[in-house]
Amino acid sequence: MPSKERHEDTIPAGSRLSFDHFSLVYLDGSHDPTVVWLEIERLLPRIIPRGFLIVDDTDWFDGAIRQRLEAAAPRLPITVCHQGKQTIITVDADPPQLVPEP
C-alpha cells in the first residue's frame, strides 16, 4: 500500500534545500532580446561558481543577446561560449551582478 506521507514530511526540519542557487539553468523562453536580457540579469547572480547558464536561440534578432553578453563579459567573472544556437555562460567566480552598461 502506498505511503500517505508527503515528500515534504520526510525531510527533517531545518534541512530543506533552498532553490536560491543553481549549478545549471537552461533558458529557453522568449526570443525578445529585452525579455531575454532581463531573465539573464535575474538568473546569472543565482548561478554558483563553476555553474552554467545556457541560453537558447541567442542567434535571433541578429545576435543581439550574443552582442550584449560579449560586451558584458570582460567586466564579469564569466566565460561566454557560443555553440550553434545556444550560448553557454560559465560562472568563473562568485555569482556576478550585472550592472547597466555605461
Image (cartoon, rainbow, N blue to C red):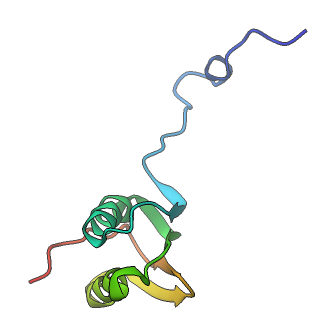
Q: Up-down: is 17 above or below 74?
A: above
Image quarter hosting the C terminus? bottom left
- At x 68% / y 20%, what residue is drawn? 10
Q: Nearer the viewer, residue 16 or 4?
A: 4
Q: Is residue 1 left or right of residue 86?
A: right
- The answer to whether residue 53 is above or below residue 71 is above
Question: Would you place residue 38 above or below residue 69 in this image?
Answer: above
Give the percent coordinates (x, y) of residue 20: 42, 47
Q: How many marks?
A: 0
Residue 28 x %, y %: 49, 63
Residue occupying the point 85% across, 12% down: 2
Residue furthest to the front in view is: 61
Looking at the image, the residue that sits furthest to the right is 1
Residue at left offset 40%, top offset 58%: 46
Q: Nearer the viewer, residue 41 or 62?
A: 62
In depth, the one of 83 and 32 nearer the eye is: 32
Please state if 2 lies on the left or on the right of 86 as rendered.
Answer: right
Residue 81 at x, y percent in the picture: 50, 88
Q: Which quadrant would the N terminus be assigned to in this image?
A: top right
Q: Quadrant of residue 44?
A: bottom left
Vertical order, 75 against 52 (above or below): below
